Amino acid sequence: MTLFHFFNCAALTFGPHAVYYQATPLSEYDTVGSCIRAALVYLGTTLIKLVCLATFLHGTESEGFDFTQEILKALIGFLDVAGLYFALTQLTYRNISQTHKFQAIGLGWAFADSLVHRLAPLWVGARGLEFTWDYLLKGLESNANLVFTVCLAALGSLMWLRKNKPATLVPIIYASAGLVATMPSITSYLRKGLHWDFSKVVGFELAASLAMAFVTWRLFSACQRPS
């Protein structure tokens, strides 16, 4: 039963990435290599972030919300934006259009993030003797993270790759990208500052990811129209 629970949680955590790949043109263009490149950029970015976190943040046993520490975490978290910029603008991708390029990068980035942050906890915790909803919630959180990452990659492609976008949409694009990039700090405040339990935080992340997906889709569609 515990192994069955682990497989359920793993399917919920990693299954949507495979479904996204198969349900979009990414599978038709054979973009596995592009996804792997994005995953490698994510690993490099994460290593740099870990070094920065160890250098600039002091260790604390308090679980409360430390405003100064969270601001530093948010600033360091913007290295993800730099990593996505590198993946979108500096790497070359064959057999893939600009329209699908951000999807391959976002998918590879999100899958690598789930592997790094969720596979080991699932393997250790979901196979325990006592059933808990936390690992199913972590799977739902991984789905929200997938949507956030693809949205950020799409917004990044609008900012850095599309030149003929409407000038009136530029502030909205940058504001939306900034909001998605700071989402980890927002959820941290909900957990530590407002003391929300994990289920409420995951519910907020799912709702926010759907809202950001709709906003990103509208922005991307508007920028696709001929000026």
Image: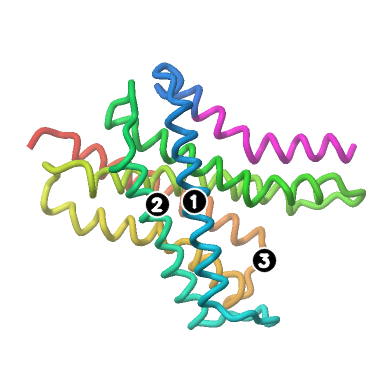
Kindly indicate whether the residue at mark 3 contacts the one at mark 2 (C-beta within 8 angstroms).
no
Q: Which residues are magenta?
A: 1-20
Q: Which mark is residue 44?
A: 1
Give the quarter of the image for residue 104.
top left
Q: Picture coordinates of residue 7 (x, y %)?
A: 77, 35
- Give neighbour class at mark 2: few <14, some 14-19, many 20+ (Cα, 10 Å): some
* Residue at 24% from the left image edge and 37% from the top image edge: 221
Q: CA distance from mark 2 to mark 1?
A: 8 Å
**Residue at mark 2:** 83
* Residue at 78% from the left image edge and 45% from the top image edge: 123
Q: Nearer the viewer, mark 2 or mark 3?
A: 2
* Residue at 57% from the left image edge and 71% from the top image edge: 54
Question: In this view of the protein, which residue sits in the foreground, 146 or 90?
Answer: 90
Q: Nearer the viewer, mark 2 or mark 1?
A: 1
- Give neighbour class at mark 3: few <14, some 14-19, many 20+ (Cα, 10 Å): few
Q: Secondary structure at mark 2?
A: helix
Q: Is residue 128 left or right of residue 197?
A: right
Q: Picture coordinates of residue 40 (x, y %)?
A: 49, 42
In the image, is residue 147 part of the stretch drawn in magenta?
no
**Residue at mark 3:** 197
Q: CA distance from mark 2 to mark 3?
A: 31 Å
Secondary structure character of the magenta stretch overall: helix
